[in-house]
Amino acid sequence: MTTKPIIPESTHSAERAGGHWILARLGKKVLRPGGRETTQFLLENLSLTGATVVEFAPGLGVTARDILGKGPARYIGVDSDADACANVRAILPAGPHEVRNTNATDTGLESDSFDVVIGEAMLTMQTDKHKLELMREAARILKPGGLYGIHELSLVPDNVSTAVKEDIAKALARSIKVNARPITVPEWAALAREAGFDVINIRQADMALLSLKRNLKDEGLKGVFTIVRNVISQPDLRKRVLGMRKTFTEHKDHLGAVGIILQKRAQ
Ligand SMILES: C[S@@+](CC[C@H](N)C(=O)[O-])C[C@H]1O[C@@H](n2cnc3c(N)ncnc32)[C@H](O)[C@@H]1O
């Protein structure tokens, strides 16, 4: 299962593409703010073996591989990007598994029928209204008592001012080219409750997507070497990644990462 990700330059150009695609083109595989350790927290707390699992926004399929490695009864990936879907389809083993190229607000899946939904680094990049819509779709397709694991950017501290919030949203839109609107951990929890979930477990981590230490952990020495070589040899991508790094550094005191395990309330 070592299929190379398909990241076409035409649809993910250096100037306009969302930051996650820039990082993917540079060879970065772990595109989540809390790194592999936060993903691990989700995987350990979601009881995936033998479960029916839906992944929102599998992207490059890194977590999809981990989920499939746990032996779910059924895996369904849902991503709005056709290239992402092609990547994940390429790693599906034989069985009742599939990938749907659609917005996760409207999966077309049956209500009350899945054990687990997992989604990483995809809610933050939506407006608060869309965040809620996506969480409600997760609640709709889960069985009562089913688990939903999210892994997202957070704002710290919990009482961060509206001015700082707006400032960060603007800076992220400029550098990542995605209208990312991170919220505080209590705000994530409130949104989840509104969508029909109870909060079961929370793990907070540093937002260290571009730190050397985190990348050595997440990508390994060989992976970091590949990324650095690509950064040096591709000036258009370098410009974008340095812009992102500057934004993350400027706002480091207010950016965090969070993994949350949610459980669908029985009606
Ligand atoms: C930052 S990547 C995260 C990918 C993966 N979850 C990971 O952690 O590596 C964002 C992915 O979310 C997908 N995405 C964003 N919004 C979506 C939505 N509303 N429905 C389905 N996929 C979405 C994008 O197409 C992209 O593949």
Image (tube, rainbow, N blue to C red):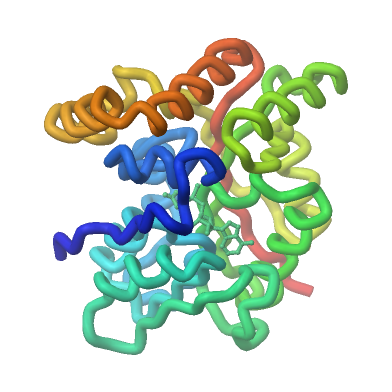
Q: Is residue 19 above or below residue 65?
A: above
101 to 174, vertically: above or below: below
The N terminus is located in which quarter? Answer: bottom left
**135 left or right of 219?**
right
Residue 168 in the image, given as x and y percentages of width and height: 71, 24
Is 121 drawn above or below residue 226 in the view shown? below
User: Which of these two is toward me, 55 or 215?
Assistant: 215
**Would you say residue 116 is visible in this rendering?**
no
Where is residue 185? Give x, y as percent.
69, 33
Would residue 91 be seen by someone viewing this image from the given angle? yes
Whole-percent x, y for residue 65 in the image: 28, 61
> Residue shown at 62%/54% (left/top)?
262
Foreground of the two, 33 or 52 = 33
In this rendering, the answer to whether 63 lies above or below 180 is below
Quadrant where the image shows the C terminus: bottom right
Question: Percent from the top left, x then y, of residue 216?
Answer: 24, 25
Picture quadrant of residue 238: top left
Q: Residue at x 26, y 23 (%)?
A: 232
At a point 44% along the width and 46% down the height, the residue shown is: 21
Residue at 55% across / 31% down in the picture? 257
Quarter-of-image position of residue 58: bottom left
Q: Is residue 213 left or right of residue 188?
A: left
